[in-house]
Amino acid sequence: MKPHFLHITNGDYTTKHLQNLNFNGNYITWREMLCEGQTLTDVGSETFWKTRFDFLKSSYKISKKKFIDYTLKEYRNLCKHKQQDEIVLWFESDLFCQVNMLAVISWLKKHRHGYKISLVTSGKLDYTNKMYNLPQLNEEQIQLHFKNRATLTQDDIEYADYIWQLYCSDSPLRLETVHQFNPMSPFSYLADAIKAHLLRFPSIENGLNIIENSILQTVKQNEFSSKEELIQSLLKNQENYGFGDIQYNNNLNEMKRLFTSFNPVKLSKMGRKVLFNQMNFYAHIRSDFSYLGGSKKYNFLQTNNTGKLLKITS
């Protein structure tokens, strides 16, 4: 008798790819982007989902119907699955996926204690630096990844849950070191993802974070006839974030004072000054409603000379 698998995937493309390859089992697609907006530790609670909807509605104009149909219904399907022999997590190496993975493991720790949980993570396949997404893998590669999946020990689950608790705390300072203390864990891309997360806090030099500064740098070095062309370039060259076009659209909307035009894309005088650290944009972009995990984004500053975060005291 074949074992009964429950596959929890990082997105619809991965789910469809695995289904097309006839992987045995049921599927749950985790449709969230917990790397953006406020998060709470108790994944799946009523307060958790209310907080998430409030963020998605205000930042991305997501309707309640879409949120229910797209995210909550899939989560409720997850709650119903209790008979599987093994839960297989399919997540990629970028920040977007790694944060979602932590949240799912935290939920499983609480609601599926004692179940066999394994992890398939895509990333580097060879000695090049190219990072591969799960839907980019052919059948042979997918089968090899599945065969070599890591079975999570209770210590692994506790560790992932602990990092999730820290991610949701009101200070990111402990994340600066704690994620480095478990080099033998199966979460081989987690340390890089946490480093990428910490770089999203604003720089003390000009008030923008690494993503916002990279947008200005990209515009300075290239010519783009439209916002869409710029976003495609940003998507192609992003390092370890795994963002989609809606995230970059949101970034550009928050930074619009730094541009004179998006068709074609042109930096304003203020934009050039901010890029060259001749002006600090912190006061213009700061918001008390902007969160990264459980921390207010603008309560911490990235110090360029040390790479450490500083808490702003009121």
Image (cartoon, rainbow, N blue to C red):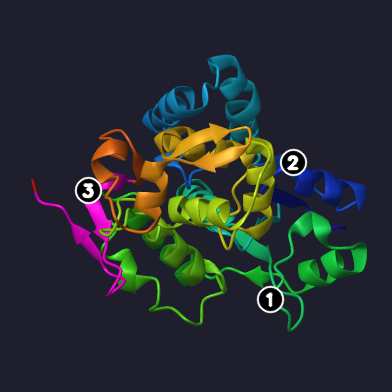
Residue 129: mark: 1
Which residue bears the numbered disc 2? 12
Q: Which residues are magenta?
A: 294-313
Kind of residue indicated by mark 3: Asn
Residue that appears at 44% across and 40% down: 268
Element type at mark 1: loop
**In 3D space, how far apart are the residues under numbered discs 3 and 1 (Cα atoms)?**
34 Å
- Quarter of the rendering containing residue 269: top left
Residue displayed at 80% across by 48% down: 25
Separation (CA) of disc 2 from disc 3: 35 Å
Quadrant including the C terminus: top left
Residue picked out by circle 3: 299
Which residue is pictured at 51% across the width and 57% down the height? 217
- Nearer to the camera, 189 or 41: 189
Q: Are marks 2 and 3 in contact (CB under 8 Å)?
A: no
Residue 207 in sight here = yes
| Mark closest to the chain's N terminus, 3 or 1 | 1
Return the disc, 2 or 1, that comes first in the chain's sequence. Answer: 2
